[in-house]
């Protein structure tokens, strides 16, 4: 089962990365200014990018796999999983379930979840790198495509309602204290 999870995720990453790279070659991207209503999710995305960077730094620093596994599972439990829940429960009702962006969001959430479950079963460096790359690409998709689209189709009232829902369900403030990503 773990090998199937990894193969599916690798295929997803390969095609997402290929499309992302092609899009970067096509256009120069300016910094994104997010509406205040979606800014809480964007701040969480920043933390997600830091998570991926920290894991990759940990691999480069030869951090024991068990420590990286524990950090990954902790981050999944306290940050990624609740964040995915908010996106699916608060944002997605504004898109038809068959909308290509809604479908992609859900598929990528499922792929990331499957990878985390695979890492819980058996951890290796390649699975961690695949998870980090998929999470990176997923965050870039949401920031550069999905959120911009949502901001363009939703009214200020709808965005305010989303913000109110996000404020009701803040993520955990629990911090990970072992800074394994810092080279010593």
Image: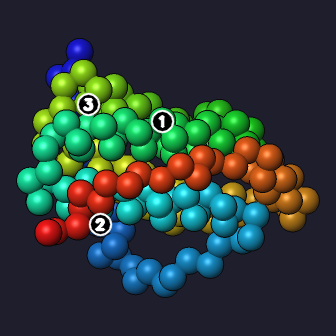
Which quadrant does the C terminus fall into? bottom left
- Within 10 Å of the Cα at label 1, are there few (<14), some (14-19), or many (20+) other Cα atoms? few
- 49 vs 118, left or right, is right
Position of residue 26 relative to residue 58, above or below, is below
Frontmost of labels 3 and 1 is: 1
Q: Residue 38 falls in which quadrant of the image?
A: bottom right
Q: Which residue is mark 1?
A: 77
Q: Which residue is mark 2?
A: 22
- Per the image, label 2 sits on a secondary structure element best described as helix
In the image, residue 104 lies at what x, y percent?
A: 49, 41
Question: Which circle's residue, 2 or 3, is located before the other in the chain?
Answer: 2
- Within 10 Å of the Cα at label 3, are there few (<14), some (14-19), or many (20+) other Cα atoms? many
Residue sitting at x 31%, y 54%: 178
Residue sitting at x 74%, y 70%: 36
Distance between the alpha carbons at the discs numbered 3 and 1: 13 Å
Question: Which circle's residue, 1 or 2, is located before the other in the chain?
Answer: 2
In the image, residue 71 lies at what x, y percent?
A: 33, 43
In the image, residue 106 lies at what x, y percent?
A: 52, 35
Which one is in front, 90 or 124?
A: 124
Q: Which residue is mark 3?
A: 119
- 162 vs 54, left or right, is right
Residue sitting at x 8%, y 53%: 62
Which quadrant does the N terminus fall into? top left
């Amino acid at each position: 089962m773990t090998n199937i999870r990894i193969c599916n995720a690798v295929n997803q990453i390969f095609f997402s990365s290929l499309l992302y790279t092609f899009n970067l070659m096509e256009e120069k991207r300016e910094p994104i200014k997010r509406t205040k209503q979606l800014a809480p999710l964007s701040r969480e995305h920043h933390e997600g990018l830091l998570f991926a960077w920290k894991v990759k730094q940990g691999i480069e620093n030869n951090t024991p796999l068990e420590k990286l596994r524990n950090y990954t599972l902790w981050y999944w439990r306290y940050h990624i999983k609740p964040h995915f829940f908010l996106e699916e429960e608060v944002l997605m009702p504004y898109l038809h379930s068959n909308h290509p962006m809604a479908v992609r969001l859900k598929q990528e959430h499922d792929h990331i979840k499957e990878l985390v479950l695979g890492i819980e079963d058996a951890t290796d460096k390649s699975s961690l790198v695949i998870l980090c790359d998929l999470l990176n690409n997923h965050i870039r998709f949401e920031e550069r495509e999905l959120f911009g689209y949502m901001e363009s189709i939703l009214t200020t009232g709808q965005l305010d309602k989303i913000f109110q829902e996000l404020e009701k369900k803040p993520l955990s403030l629990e911090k990970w204290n072992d800074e394994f990503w810092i080279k010593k």
